[in-house]
Amino acid sequence: MAGKNLDPSSSPRALLGAELRVARERAGLSQAELGEPLFVSGSFIGQLEAGTRRMHIEFARQIDDILDTNGFFARNCGAVAKSKYPDHFAAAAEAEALAKGIREYAPQLIPGLLQTEAYARAVCRAYQPTATDETIDELVTNRLARAALLRNPTTPMFWCVLDEAVLRRAGDNPAVLAEALRHIASLIRAHRIIVQVLPFSAGFHAGLLGFLQLMSFEEAPPLAYIEGEGTGQLFDDPATVARHALTYDLLTASALSPEKSLALIESVAEDYEHDQHA
């Protein structure tokens, strides 16, 4: 193994993870035992092996030393280091692409996986009012590319709780939000996604601290991702993930049923369409 390099065109993260598993087992180490000198959990090593987490150069060098792999991982981790997403979101976006299930709470904006082109463009322009058109085009293209995940008819299972504020933030052009809400409604009616609306009448609730995403995988531990302005944290610690999962469960308990949520989404979309015509 130590003499070859990986082909970057053939899922390099998955290949690198598979090689890590082989090298670890050859050395007779468990995931927890390999994680200990790296100061990471066994779950984190499992994520690396499953390809749901990127291997950074610092870890790669230490892994080469521990497993005596003659610089293999340091040479090849460059194939998985580049990302088209911001640094704080890159790891979450890469994991998202491999997830079997995604559950998400959106307090302010329609989630990226559900955005239309016009809505994504309006959001990106609002975040970067002085950016060039080329920069905005690239951001929108990357965001829409993420939404391609939902073209698969069954995987990942996507369940979202939208705060009612998401439905009411129309901006200067109500037609943009109306189109975006119609898009969500069409995905619901096609039985592709599950959406619940958390109404203003719910009052104080478990998700007041902001955006939350939970991801589950076929052969790796679950992850939780939280995000703020220009920052993001990805968690694999079982206790932390479980705590965030409880938060999501509480949100779904406070939200409208999927049927009532769909009715509200379509009603609000119709209101904004009438505003545009007026």
Image: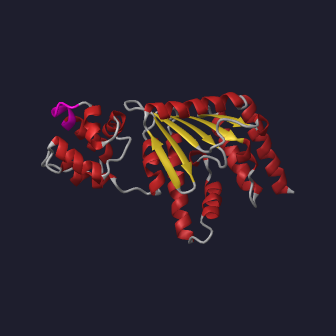
State the residue in front, 263 or 54: 54
Count all numbered tags in the image, as a single digit: 0
- Tell whether 171 sits left or right of 195: right
Task: Tell me: residue 149, above or below residue 173.
Answer: above
Q: Is residue 155 visible?
A: no
Task: Tell me: residue 204, above or below residue 141.
Answer: above
In percent of the image, x 73 and y 46: which residue is there? 165
Residue 166, position as x, y percentages in the image: 70, 47
Q: Which residues are magenta?
A: 23-29
Q: Quadrant of the N terminus?
A: top left
Q: Quadrant of the C terminus?
A: bottom right
Task: Tell me: residue 222, above or below residue 75.
Answer: above
- Tell whether 156 sits left or right of 197: left
Find out whether residue 196 is within the magenta segment: no
In percent of the image, x 21 and y 35: which residue is there? 24
State the residue in front, 170 or 223: 223
Residue 164, position as x, y percentages in the image: 73, 42
Q: Is residue 98 visible?
A: yes
Residue 66, position as x, y percentages in the image: 18, 42
Q: According to the image, what is the colour scheme of the structure? A: secondary structure
- Tell whether 86 sits left or right of 206: left
Residue 75, position as x, y percentages in the image: 21, 54
In percent of the image, x 24 and y 35: which residue is there? 21
- Tell whether 206 sits left or right of 12: right
